[in-house]
Amino acid sequence: MDFLAGCMGGAAGVLVGHPFDTVKVRLQVQSIDKPLYRGTIHCFQSIIRQESVLGLYKGIGSPMMGLTFINAIVFGVQGNTMRWLAEDTPMHQFLAGAAAGAIQCVICCPMELAKTRMQMQGTGEKKSSTRKLYKNSLDCLARIYQREGLRGVNRGMVTTLIRETPGFGVYFLAYDLLTRSLGCEPEDPYMIPKLLFAGGMSGIASWLSTYPVDVIKSRLQADGVGGKYQYSGIMDCTRKSIEREGLRVFTRGLTSTLLRAFPVNAATFATVTLFLMYMRPDEGPKDCETAPAHHAALQQQTQPSSL
């Protein structure tokens, strides 16, 4: 039941947040010499005008496909780690989240590679254009594997690991601290808004903590589109990016990301909560302060499959 609720919540988060993610990726990897977009709003407008509204949902098949596997890994690892640590404390929440984030990279990295390549496909082209390098996310991964082998499919794995490990740790830690400080007594009429607020703000906190790494990851995974490679590795990508664009490069697409982070996590949490309340009418939410075991379980249920 919890697994199904998590999957539904994650799917809701993907549907709400994918357009913002597409804009983020386009802004992160666009050329500094010939930029196509002036900012977040202009990027939204350009994609809709040139590629239709569906252009904002390019690559959505990849995160949807990986949703079930990522949720299974995150829930399983986080839950088992919390049981092994025995005590529900903020530090243990961070450690359990970090462990879950690290292990789910096995699925997350290829999924995001396909998503990024699909999002970059047809950049700046009119929607009437029929030229497509990849038919869908699976076709994208298959073609990458044919050209570059297993190493190509796992391109950006190190940066994904560096991002996801502390990212999930910060998410679980922030969510734990916020829900504890806000309180969520069962008779409180504002309990759901408080939990939604905690989830949304936790998503923002996790992105702020790892965003520079995400920029490098996106650039490495988008590198090679069209057959031309610019970077030999993480350090080369970081050095060249700073040399050409300065430290400001690490804030590219940040506005779109933060605009996406809150509604994605709020939508995920709302979907999970409503689903569980409907399926378990006799099991209302318990007090977060007085029931740490339930608090830990509820937290597992409401984590998004992707930050």
Image (cartoon, grey):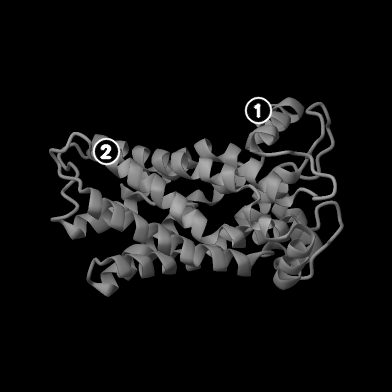
Residue 270 position by quadrant? top left
Whether residue 98 sits left or right of residue 147 in the image: it is left
Q: Which mark is residue 293?
A: none
Residue drawn at the location 36% of the way across and 64% of the way down: 78
Instruction: Say if 8 sits above or below 83 in the image.
Output: above
Q: Amino acid at mark 1?
A: Val
> Relative to the observer, which residue lies in front, 56 or 197?
197
Instruction: Say if 10 sits above or below 41 in the image.
Output: below
Instruction: Say if 49 sits above or below 112 in the image.
Output: above
Residue under pointer 2 = 192
Q: Position of residue 113 (x, y in %)?
A: 66, 55
Whether residue 108 sits left or right of residue 40 in the image: it is left
Instruction: Say if 240 sits above or below 204 in the image.
Output: below
Residue under pointer 1 = 53
SS at mark 2? helix
Q: Position of residue 200 (x, y in %)?
A: 40, 45
**Residue 228 in sight:** yes
Residue drawn at the location 23% of the way across and 72% of the way down: 86
Mark 2 crowdedness (10 Å alpha carbons): few <14, some 14-19, many ≥20 = some
Camera-near label (2 vs 1) is 2
Residue drawn at the location 29% of the way across and 37% of the way down: 193
In contact (CB < 8 Å): disc 2 and disc 1: no
Whether residue 31 sits left or right of residue 252 in the image: it is right
**Residue 304 in sight:** no
SS at mark 1? helix
Of the numbered discs 2 and 1, the one sitting upstream in the chain is 1
Q: Amino acid at mark 2?
A: Ile
Residue 250 position by quadrant? bottom right
> Relative to the observer, which residue lies in front, 187 or 36?
36
